[in-house]
Amino acid sequence: MPRAIDGTRRKERRKKILKDAKGFWGRRSTNLRAAKDAVAKAGQYAYRDRRRKKRDFRRLWITRISAAARMEGLNYSQFMAGLKKAEIDIDRKVLSNLAIEDSAAFSTLAAEAKKALGA
């Protein structure tokens, strides 16, 4: 009985790894050994950064809110404390969007926050 040397399963596995490594630089995209390591490392980065993305966006929103609040004469923590006291419950993503796209509405919120802090 003839010996199966290069079976289809092995070929499929190699093709899958090389497909995942498509676009990588140098032999990391063509050489199976290098591609296997590169694909494994890329998977680790992807896993880590799916979690990091949430942190990064929150930091961006806070930076934008802070900049807009300073233009209204408040710092970030005062602005957020004022909104909490005024019982205005808007998340940071929406506040950031308001700061960029609708500065009049953000100014209204800042005025409400100031009023709540002053009371």
Image (cartoon, rainbow, N blue to C red):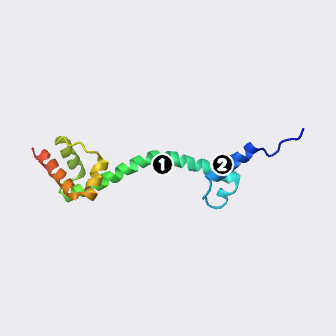
Q: Earlier in the sequence, mark 2 or mark 1?
A: 2
* Residue 24 vertical placement versus 37 (above, below): below
Q: Which quarter shows the N terminus?
A: top right
Q: Which residue lies under the disc numbered 1? A: 49
Residue shown at the point (29%, 48%) measured from the top left: 92
Marks 2 and 1 in Cβ contact (< 8 Å)? no
The image shows residue 43 at horizontal and vertical percentages of 56, 47
**Mark 1 crowd level (few <14, some 14–19, many ≥20, 10 Å Cα):** few
The image shows residue 111 at horizontal and vertical percentages of 14, 52
Q: Amino acid at mark 1?
A: Asp
The image shows residue 2 at horizontal and vertical percentages of 88, 41
Q: Which mark is residue 16?
A: 2
Residue at the far left: name it.
119
**Mark 2 element type:** helix
Q: Amino acid at mark 2?
A: Lys
Residue shown at the point (55%, 46%) measured from the top left: 44
Residue at the far top: name it.
1
The image shows residue 7 at horizontal and vertical percentages of 78, 44
Residue shown at the point (30%, 51%) measured from the top left: 62
- In the foreground, 80 or 112: 112
Residue shown at the point (32%, 52%) measured from the top left: 61
The CA span between labels 2 and 1 is: 23 Å
Q: Locate residue 22 relative to residue 7 in the image: left or right.
A: left
Q: Locate residue 23 relative to residue 118 in the image: left or right.
A: right
**Mark 1 element type:** helix
Please state the total of marks drawn on the protein image.
2
Q: Which quarter shows the C terminus?
A: top left
